Amino acid sequence: MEWVIIIVAGAVVWLWFKMSTIKKINHAFVMDVVGESFKNPDGTPRQKIIAALSEGAAVDLVAEPDNAYDDKAVAVMTPGGQIGYLPAGRCVDVFNRLTRGEKVPAAVHEIRGGAQGQWHRGVWIAIGKADA
């Protein structure tokens, strides 16, 4: 019976971690990137761009107020091209900071997947807080 409780508790912790897309870390927060499975308008697969990234690499956040799907969209850009967006509805603060002209520092925090049959890669980025 105890092992069932341990398994259930472990599953709950795993689900909480998986469902929590923002977690506080050292003066920053971490957020997942969405849309990594799409191709960019020039036809470049975002997965190909992500495959060339490494953890710690700087990324640029770009506000897209004219985005057809989300008027507060924030694109995640690398020197190789766009890798996706910050999740809609959870990046309004970052969008507002960008539209006020603030530089919002961001870097690749973690790349998940892409190994041993896991073709799809997911990216989490660390985003700097506003200056106090």
Image (cartoon, helix red, strand yellow):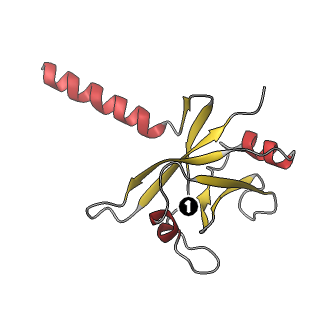
Residue drawn 22% across and 29% down? 7
Q: Is residue 38 above or below residue 13?
A: below
Q: Quadrant of the N terminus?
A: top left
* Residue wearing tag 1: 35
Single out the residue that lies furthest toward the top: 2
Residue drawn 50% across and 36% down? 20
Residue 93, image x, y percentages: 74, 39
Please indicate whether residue 117 sits to the left or right of residue 96 in the image: left
| Foreground residue among 111 and 7 | 111
Q: Is residue 69 above or below residue 126?
A: below
Element on which disc 1 rests: loop
Amino acid type indicated by mark 1 = Gly
Residue 99, image x, y percentages: 84, 49
Residue drawn 64% across and 77% down? 41
Residue 22, image x, y percentages: 55, 36
Q: Is residue 25 above or below residue 94?
A: above
Q: Residues within 10 Å of mark 1 (few under 14, many from 20)?
A: some
Please indicate whether residue 101 sits to the left or right of residue 42 in the image: right
